[in-house]
Image (spheres, rainbow, N blue to C red):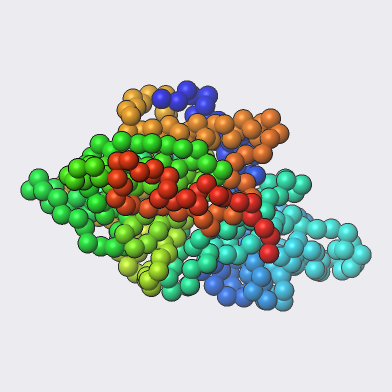
Amino acid sequence: MLSHDDNEMLCRVGPGTPGGALMRRYWHPVCTSAQLPAPDCAPLRVRLLGEQYVAFRDSNGHVGLLEELCMHRGASLALGRVEEGGIRCLYHGWKFSVSGAVLETPNHADPKYAARMTAPAFPVREAGGIVWAYVGPKELEPAFSRYAFMDAAPDHRVVLRINVACNYLQLVEGGEDSSHVGVLHTNMARPGWKDDSFTRNPDVVNPAALASNDLEPSLKIEDTAFGFHYVALRKTGESGVRNARVVPFIVPYGRIIPAPAFLFTVLEVPEDDMHTSTYIVVHGEAPVTEEKIIELLGLDDPKYYDRKNCTFNASWADSFGQSRALMKENWTGLRGVEVEDATIGLSQGPLYDRSREHLVPADQAVVRVRRALLAAVKRVMNDEQPPALGLDLRGVSACDRTLADDAAWQDLLPAHRDTIEAVEA
Protein backbone atom coordinates (compact mmCIF):
# COMPACT_ATOMS: atom_id res chain seq x y z
CA MET A 1 0.00 0.00 0.00
CA LEU A 2 0.93 3.65 -0.37
CA SER A 3 0.00 6.34 2.11
CA HIS A 4 -2.54 8.95 1.06
CA ASP A 5 0.09 11.70 1.15
CA ASP A 6 2.57 9.75 -0.97
CA ASN A 7 -0.19 8.82 -3.40
CA GLU A 8 -1.06 12.49 -3.81
CA MET A 9 2.61 13.37 -4.26
CA LEU A 10 3.00 10.95 -7.16
CA CYS A 11 -0.36 11.44 -8.86
CA ARG A 12 -0.75 15.23 -8.82
CA VAL A 13 1.22 16.78 -11.69
CA GLY A 14 -0.10 20.33 -12.02
CA PRO A 15 1.87 23.55 -11.48
CA GLY A 16 3.21 23.95 -7.97
CA THR A 17 2.97 20.27 -7.00
CA PRO A 18 5.98 18.09 -6.10
CA GLY A 19 5.04 15.56 -8.77
CA GLY A 20 4.58 18.32 -11.29
CA ALA A 21 8.02 19.73 -10.45
CA LEU A 22 9.54 16.31 -11.20
CA MET A 23 7.67 15.93 -14.48
CA ARG A 24 8.71 19.38 -15.68
CA ARG A 25 12.36 18.34 -15.64
CA TYR A 26 11.87 16.00 -18.64
CA TRP A 27 11.08 16.19 -22.33
CA HIS A 28 7.55 14.95 -23.05
CA PRO A 29 5.60 13.80 -26.11
CA VAL A 30 2.91 16.37 -26.89
CA CYS A 31 1.45 14.83 -30.05
CA THR A 32 2.33 12.49 -32.89
CA SER A 33 3.85 13.90 -36.05
CA ALA A 34 0.79 12.59 -37.89
CA GLN A 35 -1.43 14.93 -35.86
CA LEU A 36 0.33 17.85 -37.57
CA PRO A 37 0.45 16.28 -41.03
CA ALA A 38 1.53 19.18 -43.25
CA PRO A 39 2.84 22.76 -43.23
CA ASP A 40 0.14 25.27 -42.28
CA CYS A 41 -2.27 22.50 -41.24
CA ALA A 42 -4.80 23.02 -38.46
CA PRO A 43 -3.22 23.71 -35.05
CA LEU A 44 -3.69 21.28 -32.18
CA ARG A 45 -4.78 21.93 -28.60
CA VAL A 46 -2.40 20.21 -26.19
CA ARG A 47 -2.98 19.51 -22.52
CA LEU A 48 0.17 18.58 -20.62
CA LEU A 49 0.72 18.42 -16.84
CA GLY A 50 -2.48 20.35 -16.16
CA GLU A 51 -1.71 23.25 -18.51
CA GLN A 52 -2.94 24.22 -21.98
CA TYR A 53 -0.77 24.73 -25.05
CA VAL A 54 -1.15 24.93 -28.81
CA ALA A 55 1.06 23.01 -31.24
CA PHE A 56 1.35 24.01 -34.90
CA ARG A 57 3.45 23.31 -37.98
CA ASP A 58 4.50 26.47 -39.82
CA SER A 59 4.90 27.09 -43.53
CA ASN A 60 8.42 25.63 -43.48
CA GLY A 61 7.34 22.46 -41.67
CA HIS A 62 8.80 23.48 -38.31
CA VAL A 63 6.74 22.68 -35.20
CA GLY A 64 6.11 25.16 -32.42
CA LEU A 65 4.50 24.90 -28.97
CA LEU A 66 3.06 28.04 -27.38
CA GLU A 67 0.79 28.72 -24.44
CA GLU A 68 -2.72 28.30 -25.81
CA LEU A 69 -4.07 31.75 -24.93
CA CYS A 70 -2.87 34.68 -26.99
CA MET A 71 -0.63 37.02 -25.02
CA HIS A 72 -2.70 40.00 -26.19
CA ARG A 73 -6.23 39.37 -24.87
CA GLY A 74 -6.35 35.66 -24.10
CA ALA A 75 -8.20 34.21 -27.11
CA SER A 76 -7.30 30.61 -27.95
CA LEU A 77 -4.62 30.26 -30.60
CA ALA A 78 -5.99 26.78 -31.32
CA LEU A 79 -8.69 28.61 -33.32
CA GLY A 80 -6.06 30.61 -35.17
CA ARG A 81 -4.84 30.74 -38.75
CA VAL A 82 -1.55 28.98 -39.50
CA GLU A 83 -0.07 30.88 -42.42
CA GLU A 84 2.91 32.81 -43.74
CA GLY A 85 5.42 31.43 -41.25
CA GLY A 86 3.42 31.61 -38.06
CA ILE A 87 0.13 31.21 -36.18
CA ARG A 88 -2.27 34.16 -36.21
CA CYS A 89 -4.87 34.88 -33.53
CA LEU A 90 -8.36 35.36 -34.98
CA TYR A 91 -9.29 38.03 -32.45
CA HIS A 92 -6.95 40.86 -33.49
CA GLY A 93 -4.59 39.19 -35.96
CA TRP A 94 -1.47 39.04 -33.83
CA LYS A 95 0.91 36.51 -35.38
CA PHE A 96 3.64 34.46 -33.69
CA SER A 97 6.50 32.30 -34.94
CA VAL A 98 7.45 28.85 -33.61
CA SER A 99 10.04 30.59 -31.40
CA GLY A 100 7.44 32.94 -29.96
CA ALA A 101 8.59 35.99 -31.90
CA VAL A 102 5.78 38.51 -32.39
CA LEU A 103 5.63 38.88 -36.17
CA GLU A 104 2.61 41.16 -36.57
CA THR A 105 0.26 43.23 -34.37
CA PRO A 106 -2.25 44.66 -36.90
CA ASN A 107 -4.23 46.72 -34.37
CA HIS A 108 -1.00 48.41 -33.21
CA ALA A 109 1.24 48.34 -36.25
CA ASP A 110 4.41 49.60 -34.57
CA PRO A 111 7.31 47.21 -35.35
CA LYS A 112 9.24 48.45 -32.32
CA TYR A 113 6.35 47.39 -30.07
CA ALA A 114 6.27 43.88 -31.53
CA ALA A 115 10.04 43.53 -31.34
CA ARG A 116 10.01 44.15 -27.59
CA MET A 117 7.81 41.13 -26.86
CA THR A 118 8.00 37.35 -27.11
CA ALA A 119 5.09 34.97 -26.69
CA PRO A 120 5.60 32.10 -24.22
CA ALA A 121 7.14 29.39 -26.43
CA PHE A 122 8.83 26.12 -25.52
CA PRO A 123 11.70 24.05 -26.93
CA VAL A 124 10.51 21.39 -29.39
CA ARG A 125 12.09 18.35 -31.02
CA GLU A 126 10.53 16.06 -33.61
CA ALA A 127 11.88 12.51 -33.58
CA GLY A 128 10.57 8.99 -34.10
CA GLY A 129 7.17 10.12 -35.33
CA ILE A 130 6.53 12.13 -32.14
CA VAL A 131 6.66 15.85 -31.30
CA TRP A 132 8.43 16.38 -27.97
CA ALA A 133 8.57 19.50 -25.82
CA TYR A 134 10.26 20.75 -22.69
CA VAL A 135 8.06 22.98 -20.49
CA GLY A 136 10.22 23.21 -17.37
CA PRO A 137 12.63 25.85 -16.06
CA LYS A 138 14.73 27.19 -18.95
CA GLU A 139 17.94 27.07 -16.97
CA LEU A 140 17.44 23.35 -16.25
CA GLU A 141 16.65 22.16 -19.79
CA PRO A 142 18.29 18.72 -20.22
CA ALA A 143 19.77 17.18 -23.34
CA PHE A 144 17.16 15.47 -25.50
CA SER A 145 17.04 11.71 -24.87
CA ARG A 146 16.92 9.42 -27.90
CA TYR A 147 15.22 6.00 -27.98
CA ALA A 148 16.05 3.07 -30.25
CA PHE A 149 12.76 3.43 -32.16
CA MET A 150 13.90 6.84 -33.40
CA ASP A 151 16.49 5.11 -35.61
CA ALA A 152 14.01 2.64 -37.13
CA ALA A 153 12.98 2.97 -40.77
CA PRO A 154 9.49 4.50 -41.08
CA ASP A 155 8.00 1.28 -42.51
CA HIS A 156 9.45 -0.64 -39.53
CA ARG A 157 7.73 1.62 -36.99
CA VAL A 158 4.17 2.39 -35.92
CA VAL A 159 3.32 5.29 -33.60
CA LEU A 160 -0.05 5.50 -31.85
CA ARG A 161 -1.52 7.83 -29.25
CA ILE A 162 -4.42 6.72 -27.04
CA ASN A 163 -5.99 9.23 -24.64
CA VAL A 164 -7.31 7.49 -21.51
CA ALA A 165 -9.37 9.19 -18.78
CA CYS A 166 -7.42 8.11 -15.71
CA ASN A 167 -4.23 9.00 -13.85
CA TYR A 168 -0.96 8.10 -15.54
CA LEU A 169 0.35 6.02 -12.62
CA GLN A 170 -2.42 3.44 -12.95
CA LEU A 171 -1.31 2.76 -16.50
CA VAL A 172 2.40 2.81 -15.63
CA GLU A 173 1.88 0.25 -12.86
CA GLY A 174 -0.16 -2.00 -15.13
CA GLY A 175 2.65 -1.97 -17.66
CA GLU A 176 5.29 -2.90 -15.10
CA ASP A 177 3.19 -5.73 -13.64
CA SER A 178 4.39 -8.89 -15.38
CA SER A 179 2.06 -11.24 -13.52
CA HIS A 180 -1.05 -9.65 -15.04
CA VAL A 181 -0.01 -10.62 -18.58
CA GLY A 182 -0.84 -14.30 -18.20
CA VAL A 183 -4.15 -13.53 -16.48
CA LEU A 184 -5.73 -10.39 -17.93
CA HIS A 185 -4.51 -11.24 -21.45
CA THR A 186 -5.25 -14.95 -21.07
CA ASN A 187 -6.59 -15.55 -24.57
CA MET A 188 -3.48 -14.08 -26.19
CA ALA A 189 -0.98 -15.19 -23.55
CA ARG A 190 -2.15 -18.75 -22.97
CA PRO A 191 -4.12 -20.20 -25.90
CA GLY A 192 -5.72 -23.46 -24.81
CA TRP A 193 -6.54 -22.22 -21.31
CA LYS A 194 -10.12 -23.48 -21.59
CA ASP A 195 -8.78 -27.00 -22.08
CA ASP A 196 -6.19 -26.57 -19.32
CA SER A 197 -3.41 -26.82 -21.90
CA PHE A 198 -0.79 -24.41 -23.24
CA THR A 199 0.18 -23.66 -26.81
CA ARG A 200 2.35 -20.63 -27.44
CA ASN A 201 0.68 -17.86 -29.43
CA PRO A 202 2.42 -17.83 -32.84
CA ASP A 203 1.83 -14.10 -33.44
CA VAL A 204 5.35 -12.59 -33.42
CA VAL A 205 3.94 -9.06 -33.07
CA ASN A 206 1.91 -9.72 -29.92
CA PRO A 207 3.57 -8.55 -26.67
CA ALA A 208 1.21 -10.79 -24.67
CA ALA A 209 2.44 -13.96 -26.42
CA LEU A 210 4.09 -15.59 -23.41
CA ALA A 211 6.51 -18.50 -23.73
CA SER A 212 5.31 -20.10 -20.49
CA ASN A 213 2.06 -21.01 -18.74
CA ASP A 214 3.46 -20.05 -15.31
CA LEU A 215 1.13 -17.53 -13.63
CA GLU A 216 3.37 -16.95 -10.60
CA PRO A 217 6.67 -15.56 -11.92
CA SER A 218 9.50 -14.81 -9.51
CA LEU A 219 10.89 -11.29 -9.86
CA LYS A 220 14.39 -9.89 -9.50
CA ILE A 221 14.98 -6.14 -9.72
CA GLU A 222 18.08 -3.98 -10.20
CA ASP A 223 18.43 -0.20 -10.19
CA THR A 224 19.91 1.46 -13.28
CA ALA A 225 20.84 4.96 -14.42
CA PHE A 226 17.47 5.28 -16.18
CA GLY A 227 15.37 3.91 -13.29
CA PHE A 228 15.41 0.13 -12.96
CA HIS A 229 14.95 -3.08 -14.87
CA TYR A 230 13.54 -6.37 -13.67
CA VAL A 231 13.22 -9.96 -14.79
CA ALA A 232 10.13 -12.11 -14.44
CA LEU A 233 11.30 -15.74 -14.27
CA ARG A 234 8.76 -18.39 -15.30
CA LYS A 235 8.98 -22.18 -15.21
CA THR A 236 9.38 -23.84 -18.60
CA GLY A 237 8.97 -27.54 -17.79
CA GLU A 238 12.64 -28.05 -18.67
CA SER A 239 15.01 -28.73 -15.80
CA GLY A 240 17.59 -25.99 -15.17
CA VAL A 241 16.01 -23.54 -17.61
CA ARG A 242 13.46 -20.79 -17.08
CA ASN A 243 11.82 -18.20 -19.26
CA ALA A 244 13.19 -14.71 -18.55
CA ARG A 245 11.17 -11.64 -19.49
CA VAL A 246 13.20 -8.46 -18.86
CA VAL A 247 11.40 -5.11 -18.80
CA PRO A 248 12.84 -1.65 -17.97
CA PHE A 249 11.19 1.24 -16.17
CA ILE A 250 12.42 4.57 -17.49
CA VAL A 251 11.70 7.44 -15.10
CA PRO A 252 9.22 9.10 -15.06
CA TYR A 253 6.74 6.89 -17.03
CA GLY A 254 8.41 4.84 -19.75
CA ARG A 255 8.68 1.11 -20.38
CA ILE A 256 9.62 -1.25 -23.18
CA ILE A 257 7.68 -4.50 -23.65
CA PRO A 258 9.07 -7.39 -25.72
CA ALA A 259 7.11 -9.21 -28.41
CA PRO A 260 8.71 -12.18 -30.20
CA ALA A 261 9.87 -10.03 -33.15
CA PHE A 262 9.18 -6.43 -32.09
CA LEU A 263 9.54 -4.01 -29.20
CA PHE A 264 6.72 -1.90 -27.77
CA THR A 265 7.93 1.38 -26.24
CA VAL A 266 5.14 2.82 -24.08
CA LEU A 267 5.08 6.32 -22.60
CA GLU A 268 2.25 7.25 -20.21
CA VAL A 269 2.22 11.04 -20.49
CA PRO A 270 0.06 12.90 -17.93
CA GLU A 271 -2.33 15.38 -19.51
CA ASP A 272 -3.47 16.24 -16.01
CA ASP A 273 -4.23 14.39 -12.77
CA MET A 274 -7.05 12.35 -14.32
CA HIS A 275 -6.17 12.06 -18.01
CA THR A 276 -3.25 10.35 -19.74
CA SER A 277 -1.95 10.21 -23.30
CA THR A 278 -0.53 6.74 -23.90
CA TYR A 279 2.06 6.71 -26.69
CA ILE A 280 2.79 3.26 -28.08
CA VAL A 281 5.68 2.90 -30.54
CA VAL A 282 6.21 -0.51 -32.15
CA HIS A 283 9.43 -1.17 -34.02
CA GLY A 284 11.53 -4.11 -35.16
CA GLU A 285 13.66 -5.62 -37.90
CA ALA A 286 10.69 -6.29 -40.20
CA PRO A 287 8.02 -4.01 -41.67
CA VAL A 288 4.91 -3.48 -39.56
CA THR A 289 1.66 -1.70 -40.39
CA GLU A 290 -0.56 0.58 -38.36
CA GLU A 291 -3.59 -1.52 -39.29
CA LYS A 292 -1.97 -4.65 -37.82
CA ILE A 293 -1.18 -2.91 -34.52
CA ILE A 294 -4.59 -1.23 -34.31
CA GLU A 295 -6.24 -4.65 -34.71
CA LEU A 296 -3.90 -6.35 -32.23
CA LEU A 297 -4.64 -3.71 -29.60
CA GLY A 298 -8.40 -4.02 -30.18
CA LEU A 299 -8.64 -0.41 -31.36
CA ASP A 300 -10.12 -1.19 -34.79
CA ASP A 301 -13.62 -0.92 -33.29
CA PRO A 302 -14.83 2.73 -33.19
CA LYS A 303 -16.76 2.07 -29.98
CA TYR A 304 -13.34 1.76 -28.33
CA TYR A 305 -11.13 4.20 -30.22
CA ASP A 306 -11.63 7.46 -32.09
CA ARG A 307 -8.68 7.44 -34.49
CA LYS A 308 -9.10 11.11 -35.43
CA ASN A 309 -8.97 12.41 -31.85
CA CYS A 310 -6.88 9.52 -30.44
CA THR A 311 -9.45 8.97 -27.69
CA PHE A 312 -10.30 5.70 -25.93
CA ASN A 313 -14.09 5.86 -25.84
CA ALA A 314 -15.16 2.88 -23.73
CA SER A 315 -16.68 3.62 -20.33
CA TRP A 316 -18.97 2.27 -17.65
CA ALA A 317 -21.91 3.49 -19.75
CA ASP A 318 -21.81 0.14 -21.57
CA SER A 319 -19.50 -1.78 -19.19
CA PHE A 320 -16.60 -1.01 -21.52
CA GLY A 321 -18.21 -3.08 -24.25
CA GLN A 322 -17.71 -6.28 -22.26
CA SER A 323 -19.65 -9.29 -23.59
CA ARG A 324 -20.73 -11.79 -20.95
CA ALA A 325 -21.67 -14.23 -23.70
CA LEU A 326 -18.15 -13.99 -25.13
CA MET A 327 -16.69 -14.85 -21.73
CA LYS A 328 -17.58 -18.48 -22.29
CA GLU A 329 -14.53 -18.64 -24.57
CA ASN A 330 -12.76 -15.35 -23.78
CA TRP A 331 -11.32 -14.60 -20.33
CA THR A 332 -12.28 -10.90 -20.22
CA GLY A 333 -15.17 -10.63 -22.63
CA LEU A 334 -13.10 -7.92 -24.32
CA ARG A 335 -10.78 -8.01 -27.33
CA GLY A 336 -7.29 -6.59 -27.69
CA VAL A 337 -4.27 -5.86 -25.48
CA GLU A 338 -4.83 -2.12 -25.14
CA VAL A 339 -8.59 -2.47 -24.73
CA GLU A 340 -8.01 -4.83 -21.79
CA ASP A 341 -5.25 -2.69 -20.25
CA ALA A 342 -7.09 0.63 -20.61
CA THR A 343 -10.34 -0.88 -19.31
CA ILE A 344 -8.65 -2.12 -16.14
CA GLY A 345 -6.99 1.27 -15.59
CA LEU A 346 -10.32 3.05 -16.03
CA SER A 347 -12.08 0.58 -13.74
CA GLN A 348 -9.87 1.76 -10.87
CA GLY A 349 -11.42 5.21 -11.15
CA PRO A 350 -9.89 8.47 -12.39
CA LEU A 351 -7.32 8.56 -9.56
CA TYR A 352 -6.79 5.36 -7.59
CA ASP A 353 -6.38 5.39 -3.78
CA ARG A 354 -3.48 2.98 -3.13
CA SER A 355 -3.86 3.16 0.67
CA ARG A 356 -6.53 0.43 0.51
CA GLU A 357 -4.72 -2.29 -1.46
CA HIS A 358 -3.14 -5.59 -0.40
CA LEU A 359 0.11 -6.43 -2.20
CA VAL A 360 1.86 -9.76 -2.82
CA PRO A 361 5.41 -10.66 -3.95
CA ALA A 362 4.34 -10.55 -7.63
CA ASP A 363 3.79 -6.79 -7.15
CA GLN A 364 7.47 -6.07 -6.45
CA ALA A 365 8.01 -4.12 -9.69
CA VAL A 366 4.92 -2.00 -8.98
CA VAL A 367 6.30 -1.17 -5.55
CA ARG A 368 9.68 -0.31 -7.08
CA VAL A 369 8.00 2.10 -9.54
CA ARG A 370 6.53 3.98 -6.59
CA ARG A 371 9.81 4.01 -4.68
CA ALA A 372 11.70 5.23 -7.75
CA LEU A 373 9.25 8.05 -8.37
CA LEU A 374 9.09 9.08 -4.71
CA ALA A 375 12.88 9.17 -4.57
CA ALA A 376 12.97 11.23 -7.78
CA VAL A 377 10.40 13.71 -6.41
CA LYS A 378 12.46 14.14 -3.26
CA ARG A 379 15.64 14.68 -5.27
CA VAL A 380 13.98 17.51 -7.16
CA MET A 381 12.64 18.98 -3.90
CA ASN A 382 16.27 18.99 -2.66
CA ASP A 383 17.52 20.67 -5.87
CA GLU A 384 19.21 17.46 -7.01
CA GLN A 385 19.07 15.91 -10.47
CA PRO A 386 16.47 13.14 -10.95
CA PRO A 387 17.33 9.87 -12.71
CA ALA A 388 17.21 9.28 -16.49
CA LEU A 389 17.61 12.98 -17.20
CA GLY A 390 19.48 13.70 -20.43
CA LEU A 391 20.46 10.07 -21.07
CA ASP A 392 20.95 8.38 -24.42
CA LEU A 393 18.31 5.64 -24.12
CA ARG A 394 18.98 3.86 -27.42
CA GLY A 395 20.62 0.96 -25.58
CA VAL A 396 17.64 0.42 -23.28
CA SER A 397 15.58 -2.55 -24.45
CA ALA A 398 13.54 -5.58 -23.35
CA CYS A 399 13.62 -9.30 -24.07
CA ASP A 400 11.81 -12.60 -23.56
CA ARG A 401 14.28 -15.52 -23.69
CA THR A 402 15.28 -18.77 -22.04
CA LEU A 403 17.82 -18.54 -19.25
CA ALA A 404 19.85 -21.21 -17.51
CA ASP A 405 19.43 -21.23 -13.73
CA ASP A 406 23.14 -20.50 -13.22
CA ALA A 407 23.24 -17.58 -15.69
CA ALA A 408 22.99 -13.89 -14.80
CA TRP A 409 19.80 -12.37 -16.19
CA GLN A 410 21.49 -8.96 -16.46
CA ASP A 411 23.70 -10.40 -19.20
CA LEU A 412 20.67 -10.69 -21.47
CA LEU A 413 20.74 -6.89 -21.91
CA PRO A 414 24.29 -5.78 -21.04
CA ALA A 415 23.77 -2.31 -22.56
CA HIS A 416 21.63 -1.42 -19.55
CA ARG A 417 24.84 -1.19 -17.52
CA ASP A 418 26.37 1.27 -19.98
CA THR A 419 23.66 3.93 -20.42
CA ILE A 420 25.43 7.20 -21.25
CA GLU A 421 24.54 10.87 -21.35
CA ALA A 422 22.79 12.15 -24.46
CA VAL A 423 24.68 14.44 -26.83
CA GLU A 424 22.77 17.17 -28.65
CA ALA A 425 23.06 16.96 -32.43
Residue 68 falls in which quadrant of the image?
Answer: bottom right
Percent across and percent down for residue 50 are: 58, 44
From the viewer's perspective, is 375 left or right of 312? right
31 or 202, nearer to the observer = 202
Q: Is residue 46 above or below residue 229?
A: below
Residue 107 falls in which quadrant of the image?
Answer: bottom right
Location of the N terminus by quadrant is: top left
93 or 382, nearer to the observer = 382
Percent across and percent down for residue 336 are: 28, 56
Q: Is residue 145 above or below residue 214?
A: below
Q: Is residue 13 above or below residue 289?
A: above
Which residue lies most toward the left here? Answer: 195
Location of the C terminus by quadrant is: bottom right
Q: Kindly identify the residue that appears in the image at 50 percent across and 31 percent down.
A: 371
Q: Kindly identify the residue that appears in the image at 74 percent across and 63 percent down.
A: 99
Can residue 339 be seen here? The reply is no
Q: Kindly identify the residue that appears in the image at 22 percent across and 62 percent down.
A: 202
Can residue 95 be seen here? The reply is yes
Q: How many marks?
A: 0
Q: Is residue 229 above or below residue 379?
A: below
Percent across and percent down for residue 316 are: 31, 44
Residue 229 falls in which quadrant of the image?
Answer: top left
Percent across and percent down for residue 106 are: 81, 69
Q: Kindly identify the residue that appears in the image at 68 percent across and 50 percent down.
A: 142
